[in-house]
Image (spheres, grey):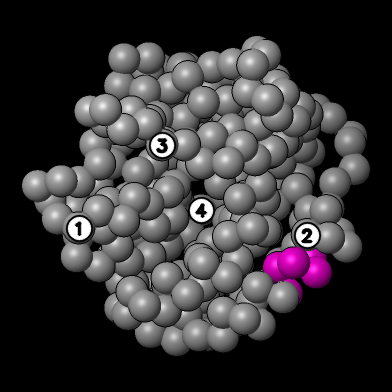
Amino acid sequence: SWLSDPSTSMAFTWRTLDTSEANMTRATVVEVCTNEAMTEGCVRIDSENSGENVGAVWHLPYSDNWKTVHKAEICGLTPGTTYYYRVGGVQGETEAWSTPAPFSTGPTADSNSRFTFVAMGDSRGAPDRLSRTIRAAVENENPAFIIFSGDFVDDGTRQSEWDAMFQQSEEYIRSTPILPVLGNHEHAAIHYYAQFNVPGEGGYYGFQFGNAMFANLNDCWNGSGFIGTYGIACTGTMI
């Protein structure tokens, strides 16, 4: 997903299935390279290499629901470029990494480059159907990103439904940014905010991709105003 300018940044979220707060995984690292072998043009964002216009890493307090959620943002990427990333790190004598996966940065705001995006929503506790839909979208349309209009699950307070959704769709959402908004079935549950990277309060927000502007709105929210925010570490506003 993105918290800042889609042409020069990327944000990541992942979980480690720790069993207690005492043994939770505190190592939070993302490595981004220009080749799948993860040997060329590499940048590592961790607690020692972070800051404004560089990137940031952080993890949420341990929860019996979602265990340990890790988040990261990397800045200073080249527009319109395919990168590969892996997340994980070293804790004690244990080193663990995800399988490298690709992602692409967006075009610059003054670009006339063509792109495709997919809008979908209302899977409502049908993770198998959602997985098939996302797979078809990714394989047939190769979208730059997916906008999801809410109701990923039937009850946003049930972690088991989120687990099923992520497990069945993981293969297809590892490389395609998801820009979500709350639906009424999420119940504004902390589970949603914990497991997604969303700018501001996540109720509604706008972003620019290439020469197009997008607004993700939540008509279940009773607040007012249009949220403008920056990412954790990068410059470039999500309007």
Gap between marks 4 and 3, in whole Å?
34 Å
The residue depicted at 45 percent of the width and 86 percent of the height is 154
Residue 186 relative to residue 179: left or right: left
Q: Give the range drawn in magenta.
A: 133-137
Residue position marked by numbered label 4 in the rendering: 205
Q: Which mark is residue 19?
A: 1
Rendered view: 199 above or below 76? below
Q: Quadrant of residue 26?
A: top left
Query: Which amino acid is tagged 2?
Result: Val
Gap between marks 2 and 3, in whole Å?
28 Å
Foreground: disc 2 or disc 1: 1
Count of numbered tags: 4
Which of marks 2 and 4 precedes in the sequence?
2
Which of marks 4 and 1 precedes in the sequence?
1
Q: 110 and 151: which one is in front?
A: 151
Q: 19 and 154: which one is in front?
A: 19
Rendered view: 185 above or below 85? below
Which of marks 3 and 2 precedes in the sequence?
3
Q: Residue 96 carries which label?
A: 3
Which of marks 1 and 2 precedes in the sequence?
1
Foreground: disc 1 or disc 4: 1
Which of marks 3 and 4 precedes in the sequence?
3
Gap between marks 1 and 3, in whole Å?
16 Å
Query: Which amino acid is tagged 3?
Result: Ala
Residue position marked by numbered label 2 in the rendering: 138
Discs 2, 1 touching: Cβ within 8 Å = no
The residue depicted at 83 percent of the width and 60 percent of the height is 139
